[in-house]
Image (spheres, rainbow, N blue to C red):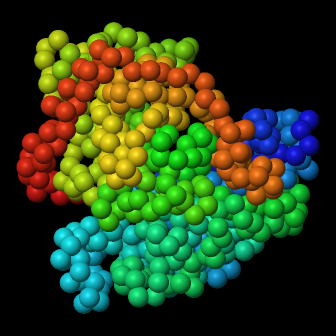
Amino acid sequence: MTDQLILAIDNGTQSLRALAFTPNGELVDIAQITLDAYRSEQPGWMEHDTAAFYTALCEACQSLWRQGRVRAEQIAAVVVTTQRATVVALDADGHPLRPAIIWADQRRARVESKRPLMWRVLFNLLGLKSTIDRFESACEANWIAQNQPDIWAKTAHFLLLSGYLNYRLTGDVVDSIGNQVGYIPFDYKAQDWCAERSWQWSSMPIRRHQLPRLVQTGERLGVITAQAAHETGLAAGTPVIAGAGDKACEVLGSGCLDATVGSISCGTTATVNATHARYVEPRPFVPPYPAALPRSYLAEIQIYRGFWMITWFKREFGHLEVAQEQPSAERLFDELLAQTPAGADGLMLQPLWNPGVGEPGPEARGSVIGFTDTHTRAHLYRAIIEGLGYALREGKERLEQRGRTRMQSVRLAGGGSQSDAVMQIFADILNCPTERPATYEASGLGAAIIGAVALGLHKDFQSAAQCMTHTTTRFEPDRERAALYDRLYREVYRPQYKRLRPLYQKLLDIYPR
C-alpha cells in the first residue's frame, strides 16, 4: 500500500464521494454515498437536510476504511470540494437552523433594500439596475430574512456548504477563498469579503460577523478534531487543507492551468472555463470566480440546465433505453446519434431553459426550430447535444475575446465526456481539438492536487498537475462537419435568441416567473 495519501471529499449534487489519491494522481479507492434528503416544498425550491451532508461525509469515510484498500492512518491531509453556492444558516452553537438552500433553488426575494444614493446613481448610469435587482432577488439571505425573520434573527453563522463541512471537521468557522461563489458579500477581484462601503452590504442582511474566516487556497484550515475523528474514522490532528469549489477543482484536475487550454464541464450545469492569473470578467460587470490555483481567477460561462437536458430526454423520450438494463441508457443514446447526420437535418435547439446573469435576459426560454415530418426522437437528441455544443462555443468565443487568448484545445469532464460521439461532435462544433482527462473524478483529483502541493509533495501546482493529470483520447475536428456546423452556428444559432426575444418577452408577460 502507498504510505501517504490525500483524501478528497467531493460533495456534489447527486452524491458525496470520499476519494483517496496517491501523490502521483492515482485513485486508490472511492466510497460514494447518494444524497437523497432533497425536498421541494414549492415548485422551483430545492433544499436538503443540512446535517445529512456531514452524515454522508462520515458514512463515506467509514465505508472507505471498510473496503480495505485504504487505511485511515495513511491519510496525510483532507481537502474538501463541494457544490457551489449552496447556503447554510447556523445558530451560535453551530446547529443548523433550517435546511440548506441548494444552488439550483429558484425562489426569489423582494427587492426592497435602501441603496446609498451614490450607488443608485452609478447603477442607473451604467444600466445595471436590473442586474443588481436580480442579484438582490436571488440572494437566499434576503429570502430568509423576509420570510423567516425568526430564523434569521438566530443566524450566527451564514456559510456555504464548504464552510459547514470544514466547520464540522475542524471545529472552526473557517472556509477557503476558493469556495466563495454565490450571493454573498464577496469581492471577487480582491478575493476577500467586501469593503465596508461596498454596495453588497446594503443589498443583503448579512453582516461580517456572520461570515467565516477566509484562508487562501492550499493553506491549512485546521486539523481533524477528536469529535470528527470519532465520526469519520480519520486520525485526530490530520491537516485539513483549504480547497476550492467543485468546478474550480475540476478545471485543475483536468490540467487546465492557463487560458490556452479550455475546460468544459458536462454536468447538470454545463460550463466553459478559462484560468487566468489576472482578473478577467467573462461578461462586463460579471466577475470571474476564484480558481483552484491560489490568487488566480476562473472565467466562466454557464449553461444552467446543461446536461440535465439528457436526463430530461431520458425521462420523457428514453423509455426504450431505460427498459434495457445493459448497456446504460446513456450509452444506447449514442446509437441515436449514429442514426442522424451532423446538423440533425436542420433541427436547431437553443438551451436557454434557465437563463442566468447577464445575457440572455430573464425573459429567455429554450427553443427548438426547424421541425419537419421527417424528424424523429433521434434527431431531437442530436439537436440537444448540438445545441449544448453551440452554446458552449458561444461561451468559448466570449472567453477568448475577453481574455485575449485563444484556446488551443479544450478538455471535457463530467458524464457527457464519457461518450466518444459527444466528444467528436463538440470537436466539430468548436472546431478545436477536444481531450478527455484520464480520470472521471476530475474535481476530486483537483482537490488532491491542492493537498499534494500543500504537503510539499510537489514543489508547485504546475509540477503537480504535470505529474498527477493526464489525458486519454484526443478528438480532432472533421473539416467537412466543422464547416457545416460553423454555418449553422453563425447563420441560425447566433441570430435565434435575438429574433425570438420579443416572443419570449410576451410569454413572460403572460406567464411571469
Horizontal relation, residue 407 to residue 239: left or right:
left
Q: Position of residue 53 (x, y in %)?
A: 63, 56
As rendered, which of 383 and 283 lies closer to the eye?
283
At horizontal 71% and vertical 45% (from top left) the residue drawn is: 463
Quadrant (top left/top right/bottom left/bottom right) for the C terminus: bottom left
As rendered, which of 44 and 258 lies closer to the eye?
258
Q: Position of residue 83 (x, y in %)?
A: 54, 53
Horizontal relation, residue 328 to residue 65: left or right:
left
User: How many labels sit on residues?
Assistant: 0
Report if residue 138 is visible in the image.
yes
175 lies above or below 390:
below
At horizontal 23% and vertical 80% (from top left) the residue drawn is: 122
160 lies above or below 22:
below
471 lies above or below 130:
above
Q: Position of residue 191 (x, y in %)?
A: 52, 70
At horizontal 40% and vertical 29% (from top left) the residue drawn is: 432
Question: Image quarter for residue 426?
Answer: top left
